[in-house]
Amino acid sequence: MSKVKITVHSLKGEPVGEVDVDDGIFDVPFRPAVVHQAVTCLLANRRQGNAATKTRGEVTGSTRKLFSQKGTGRARRGSIKSPLLRGGGIVFGPSPRSYRQRMPKKMRRLAFACVLSSKAREGAIWAIEDLKMERPRTKDVVAVLDGAGRPSSALIVVHGSQPELSLSARNLAGTTVRQCSVVNTLDVMSSAKMIVTVSALRRIEEIWGSKGDTDESA
């Protein structure tokens, strides 16, 4: 028997019922080390790693010796591509690389359950019956946020693709729309309140439950 219940609200913010959720996802002790590792992994995987500089072997320039080795009273100079000269190569500069990290599936699942449980205990998960829009309209999303207490930042989680909703929310600072199949630990951690539809909640339980398979890219 599930002991965790999340109140379901109407689009106007009025309570209309409760929904039982999986204790294995929404009632897990917070594990700071695991959550930190998951967030670090997600941030690292966002990095493109395409910063690059040219070494003395890659810059354009002649390899002719600039002047005689001895007799000039000046410092010894070889190629104009020397790192000591302006326009020369860079020593130990960055080169394209991959910052990608891997994290075991069970640890990713645990980290996600930890942040969901933390939000549930704080009352920061705002469940709604449904959130379908016929056309893009920012005013409708603002009304939903007002019903949820107008949080400083909000993560709206829906079951499937809703381009009208995404277009309606993209002009609102701090408001992010995600499908339940791709929402991750960093998304939840970065939002003050999580607004989720009941169907998305059920799908999250299927994906992240003990028998589910996660789609989070980490």
Image: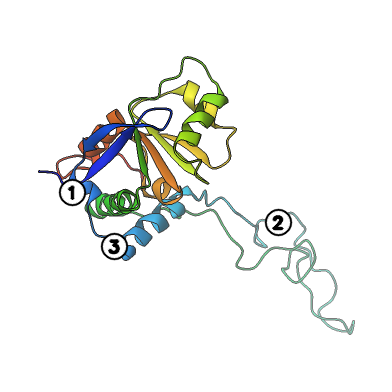
Mark 3 closeness class: few <14, some 14–19, many ≥20 residues within 10 Å: few
> Do the residues bearing badges 3 and 2 touch, measured as CB atoms within 8 Å?
no
Residue 48 against residue 7 in the figure, above or below: below
Residue marked by disc 1: 24
Residue at screen point 76% across, 57% down: 61
On the rendered structure, is 38 left or right of 212?
right
Q: Quadrant of residue 30?
A: bottom left
> Do the residues bearing badges 3 and 1 touch, measured as CB atoms within 8 Å?
no
Residue marked by disc 3: 31
Q: Amino acid at mark 3?
A: Arg
**Secondary structure category for the residue under label 3:** loop
Mark 2 closeness class: few <14, some 14–19, many ≥20 residues within 10 Å: some
Q: Quadrant of residue 81?
A: bottom right
Q: Quadrant of residue 29?
A: bottom left
Circle on res. 59:
2
Residue 23 in the image: state x and y as whole percent: 18, 47
On the rendered structure, is 213 left or right of 53?
left
Observer-side mark, 2 or 1, equals 1
